[in-house]
Image: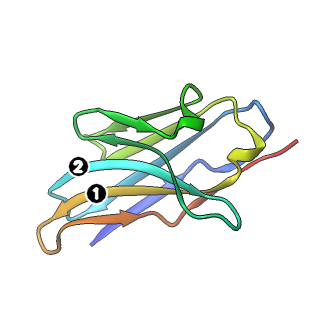
Amino acid sequence: QVQLVESGGGLVQPGGSLRLSCAASGSILSIYVMGWYHQAPGKERELVAVIKSGGRTNYADSMKGRFTISRDNAKNTVYLQMNSLKPEDTAVYYCYVDLLTPDVGRGDYWGQGTQVTVSS
């Protein structure tokens, strides 16, 4: 069974920074893609950023230049450094992982979500 444990959310003032972490554990053979999505109240879940096993990244346009995604393959952990935060970044942030297990095979997994609130 796979578990994703997120940390790092909270309340920050506009212009501030936060760093999110998500660690995957369990019976994992390989991790292909790790990333973050967010969901604001009344809106659909949207891509923030993803990073493939080779290090290639993809960002939502509104996050480019402000957010940086990275991963530590030895720790099965993905990070999201968020700088110059804006009130419109307020949302629940979900960790996403595309991985391979010996029993289920390849599948998508989601974290429980962590709240990020940007407000003065």
Q: Is residue 16 left or right of residue 59?
A: right
x, y percent for residue 107: 25, 66
* Cα–Cα span, label 1 and label 2: 6 Å
Check residue 56 in the rendering and tell me which mark sits there, or answer none: none
Relative vertical location of residue 41 with respect to residue 86 in this rendering, above or below:
below
Q: Residue at x 11, y 68 (%)?
A: 102
Q: Tell me the residue that label 2 is attached to.
A: 32
x, y percent for residue 49: 45, 42
Q: In the displayed image of the protein, which residue is found farthest to the top? A: 65
Q: Tell me the residue that label 1 is attached to.
A: 98
Residue type pointed to by label 2: Tyr
Q: In the displayed image of the protein, which residue is found farthest to the front? A: 61
- Callout 1–callout 2 Cβ contact below 8 Å: yes
Which quadrant, please, contains the C terminus?
A: top right
Q: Residue at x 76, y 30 (%)?
A: 15
Relative vertical location of residue 94 with respect to residue 54 in this rendering, above or below:
below
Mark 2 element type: strand
